[in-house]
Amino acid sequence: MAFCHVFCTDSQAVSWRHWPGYPGVNDAIAVFRFQLPEQTFMPPKLLALFQPDEISRAGRYHRSEDRQRFVYARGLLRVLTGRYTHQSPDQVRFTKDTNGKPSLAGNTGWHVNVSHSGNWILVAIGNVSLGVDVEQIQPQFSFDDILPTSFSQAEQAYVRAGADSRRRFYAVWTRKEALIKATGKGMDDYFFQIPALDGSHRTESHLIGGTGDWQVMGFDLSTDYLGAIAYQVTAGAPKFYTLESGLFVDVES
């Protein structure tokens, strides 16, 4: 039976550097946050970067805010990965690995992952397998209903012991999601066994869907938004950047 180690930590005091002063491809792992503009208008240049299947997917969203999230997330992914792989954004191609995890086509050496919730988008790019998750803290969400099936006994006790149990729930949830996205395992009946509490965890590899050692780090994305990143520990620590809407102004297809 194969085992791996998962190291979980919390880093609420993330230092978010602002665009355009980021070194980009010099980082082993970079995490980018982007806040959606209030208006639902989307730059035509951004849509021009899409492949026909992406345009079709965008059109299937009935709610304008859902369509906006998809378009900006996909566009952001194209612009950033284009810079990393030295391609024009419209030439970037995506595929899926054996676990169904979205990845970059070709032997680029880079791994990507994206998550969005509410009006925030989170993108991670690195030279190792990685995953990110962002969740908006919903004051009306009844998380007690899913604790028994999604969290271990220790995690349930941790959530219920704190003064802000709701925030603790989302902190644990985002860590779990980031890890299974990093390995491409996806959510299944073993989700409650995905380690997420602070500390070092020795766990069976098949439970998380990956081998080797993994680092999982939670952080504050913004007010009422929590995020997490998981990555193979062979890489250096991630750096964090804020992207402004001006990123898309001079996009060329």
Image: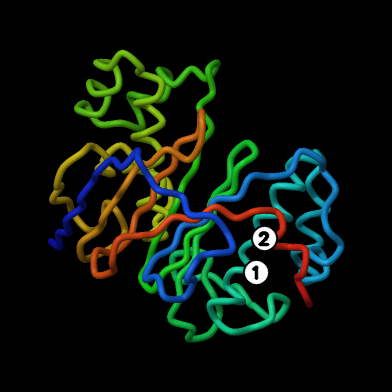
Which residue corresponds to the image point at 39% horizontal and 56% vertical from the top-left?
185
In whole angstroms, how far apart are the C-alphas of marks 1 and 2?
Answer: 6 Å
Tell me which amino acid carries mark 1: Arg
Q: Please state the horizontal and vertical placement of residue 27, each as a whole percent of the image.
A: 40, 70
Query: Mark 1, residues whose alpha carbon is within 10 Å: few (<14), some, or many (≥20)?
Result: many
Q: Camera-side residue: 156 or 236?
A: 236
Which quadrant, please, contains the N terminus?
A: bottom left
Report the disc number at residue 74: 2
Residue at 81% in and 64% down:
47
- Secondary element at image label 2: helix
Badge 2: residue crowd in 10 Å (few <14, some 14–19, many ≥20): many
**In the orientation shown, which residue stands out farthest toward the front?**
21
Q: Which mark is on residue 78?
A: 1
Instruction: Give me the residue at 48% from left, 17% from top.
Output: 142
What SS does tag 1 mark? helix
In the drawing, what numbered circle is on residue 155? none
